[in-house]
Image (cartoon, helix red, strand yellow):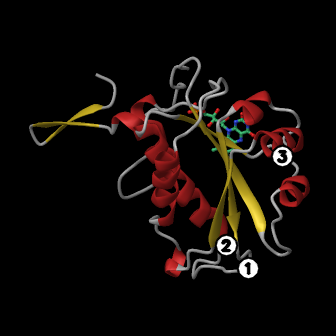
Amino acid sequence: MEGQYDNRGQTVKLLPQIERRFSCTDFLDEPVGDQDITLILDAGRRAPSAKNRQAWRFIVINDSETKKGIQNAAFGQEHVGSASLIIALCTTNIDYRMPNGQLSYPIDISIASAFMLLQAESLGYATCYISTYDETKVREIVSVPYSMKVVMLLLVGKAGSRGLPKEKKSLHEVSSFNHW
Ligand SMILES: Cc1cc2nc3c(=O)[nH]c(=O)nc-3n(C[C@H](O)[C@H](O)[C@H](O)COP(=O)(O)O)c2cc1C
């Protein structure tokens, strides 16, 4: 069965949230409860970050007018305006590089947002990452200070229709042991 592997005689399974997740473009007009919002944000807050710097700010956008503005800034993508929540994942530092020379903020924000996405899935919500937006416009709408960035948007809401998880490359194609 998909996602089940024999591990030393034991059957282990992927997290159901990982197995069923898909990028949703069809959201119902239903709010995300306050407690659920807190749980989703808390999942992001607890994520690992380089040197535990936690250089992030998560802006929850659930006001209809503001969502409309973000939809416009996202070149009119309808699901952006129809999701119950848009979480603007912002960094408070764009300069810090890790010892491997790479910038930490895209990685830190990716991990925090993945934690949020899985928490949202486990609460029965669907999600979608959005990177297609005019960052200058989004910054203006949610008053992001100079020198900080809106790295990504995460949509959360109840799915109108459940899409099928997309076809993914095989494990064999994308992984190996000990050598490339
Ligand atoms: C970094 C990133 C940026 C994305 N940007 C957008 C976007 O702007 N609009 C959108 O509808 N989906 C966006 N997506 C969703 C991808 O299209 C989707 O993850 C991909 O097609 C695989 O489908 P799946 O998430 O259902 O597995 C983005 C996903 C990622 C990870």
Q: Which residue is mark 2?
A: 103
What is the quadrant of residue 92 in the picture? Answer: bottom right
Image spot of residue 151 (x, y percent)? 72, 59
Number of the front mark, 3 or 1: 3
Name the residue: 52% across, 42% down: 33
Q: Quadrant of ligand 1?
A: top right
Q: Classify mark 3: residues with Cα within 10 Å, few (<14), some (14-19) or many (20+).
A: some
Q: Is residue 56 left or right of residue 71?
A: left
First in residue order: circle 1 vs circle 2: 1
Give the Cα distance between marks 3 and 1.
Answer: 22 Å
Q: Which residue is mark 1?
A: 95
> Which disc is residue 133 wearing?
3
What is the quadrant of residue 12 in the picture? Answer: top left
Q: Classify mark 1: residues with Cα within 10 Å, few (<14), some (14-19) or many (20+).
A: few
What is the quadrant of residue 113 in the picture? Answer: bottom right
As rendered, which of 138 and 100 lies closer to the eye?
138
Q: Amino acid at mark 3?
A: Tyr
First in residue order: circle 3 vs circle 2: 2
Image spot of residue 28 (x, y percent)? 62, 24
Q: Classify mark 2: residues with Cα within 10 Å, few (<14), some (14-19) or many (20+).
A: some
